[in-house]
Image (cartoon, coloured by chain):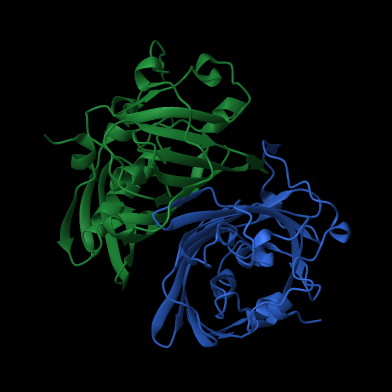
Chain colours: A green, B blue
Amino acid sequence: MAYHFDCDTEAVPRAAGVHDVQITGRWQALHGAPLGSYALAAGVRALGRQMVHPEPLAVSAHFLRPVEVGPAEVRTEIVRTGRRMATGEAHVWQGGKERLRAVATFTDFAEMNGRTATFEDPPRLPPPGECVDPLAGVTMPGGMTLLDRVEFRMAGRPGWLGGAPGGTPSCDFWMRFRDGREPDALALVFLWDVMAPMVLEIGEAPSTTLEATVHIRGVPAPGWLACRVATSHVTGGLCEEDMDIWDSRGRLVAQSRQLTLLR
Amino acid sequence: MAYHFDCDTEAVPRAAGVHDVQITGRWQALHGAPLGSYALAAGVRALGRQMVHPEPLAVSAHFLRPVEVGPAEVRTEIVRTGRRMATGEAHVWQGGKERLRAVATFTDFAEMNGRTATFEDPPRLPPPGECVDPLAGVTMPGGMTLLDRVEFRMAGRPGWLGGAPGGTPSCDFWMRFRDGREPDALALVFLWDVMAPMVLEIGEAPSTTLEATVHIRGVPAPGWLACRVATSHVTGGLCEEDMDIWDSRGRLVAQSRQLTLLR
């Protein structure tokens, strides 16, 4: 079975370091445009074809201009190839303009056998089946096709969704692809960005992501992902949004931090 | 008066997008080599000369190979110039090998006038004059010239410094340049990396930084910087270290996150 995420991030090599990607309209968020992290995942996937190690480990991306539905070109560069790590760079272009630029280091998690020690607990959420679908019965603005791709479960519905922002810009939740595609390292390069911005809970409009870095910690087990997202500091219209993601076995599998600008 | 940090990060343009930097032996840490963030600051400073906006806002760096004392070349590229933000890229080369690569977005903080709201308090430290110098009376390994450049104050001495790791990989502390140089945005691109790795508190050796991203939130006021550093998740030998930095007026001025590999 072909899953939407795999079809829509597929990059076709055209020349050395040049790949064609079709940015579809299936991953649009609150702002009505494709999510930047969707184009990022396509770029990292194209880059990954050229890396000697299979999985993205650290991906840092600067979002330069909005991504649009339509053809895109991914230009890739191999920066360094090492025994345990390899680093490359990917630029996503559309219409003669660079839309985003990412540097990514890849590794093989099968060889990451060092110490594990945890100083922060995963979210204490009821099982997904006992949680609420926060979007059930809610009419969202049109064009948010992303909601047909990813589903969420929460202990309760966030205030902003009911028109009454709760004042605390943080949230624990479950998420997964709706079509049954299981999470993997590449999916985590995309999924950190699918939750609505936490600043909605303090009465702000969706913010614009300037930069985001995702650290993948391992290949997630199949099933729902448990997530914790929080903004701690809004300063002069800038804010960070941090997300930690655990797999269905309770292992931390990703951490993301994005710097956003309030509109 | 010329300060060490300014002298030692100075980049001399040699050609379009090529700058010469002398990496000195004055910024060496526990591993006996120049701190990666020192070379990063030199690279970002060289890039900054070509940016239309004055201050670094978001700097993401992948550390490819150790930096050495000696001449270095910074190669810079202007990626995008916008009204509020400009993005560029800097590569630091030594001996024919790329040592680190950074993408940096610049802005003018004087124009960052949006909302401020805080959901996490700054460290509750006694004033610096009532804190202890954690290094007073301690004999550190030779070659740690960094300790002649930066000084620290803490509520108490961390366990690992006395040979008894405390088990909790987090710490609040004050820091400043010893020679009286006041902090600015560029200094924050360096200072996130000067504290000893928190994994020392759980009995590990210093770790290697693979990737680091620094978000600068404003130009710090003169004086001591209040810092909070923490590692929450060690997984398979990988761990993050997050540092938040407040200025002497209690304003958050930077957040960094690095991904490190235990040795």
Q: Position of residue A102 (x, y in %)?
A: 38, 57
Most distant residue in the top direction = A137
Instruction: Determine whether B68 is above or below A229 in the image.
Output: below
Task: Give the residue at x 67% y 54%.
Answer: B171
Residue B11 in the figure: left or right of residue A16: right
Task: Give the residue at x 44% y 68%.
Answer: B263
Most distant residue in the right direction = B129
Task: Give the residue at x 69% y 78%.
Answer: B6
Instruction: Determine whether B261 is above or below B68 in the image.
Output: above
> Does residue B83 show up?
no
Instruction: Determine whether B14 is above or below A45 in the image.
Output: below
Most distant residue in the left direction = A1
Q: Position of residue A25 (x, y in %)?
A: 28, 34
> Does residue A2 show up?
yes
The quadrant the N terminus of chain A occupies is top left
Q: Position of residue A134 (x, y in %)?
A: 42, 18
Task: Give the residue at x 60% y 72%.
Answer: B45
The quadrant the C terminus of chain A occupies is top right
In this orientation, which residue lies closer to the viewer: A162 or B25? B25
Q: Position of residue B135 (x, y in %)?
A: 75, 70
Q: How many marks?
A: 0
In this orientation, which residue lies closer to the viewer: B81 or B66? B66
Quarter location, residue B162 = bottom right
Residue A162 in the figure: left or right of residue A151: right
In this orientation, which residue lies closer to the viewer: A65 or A136? A136
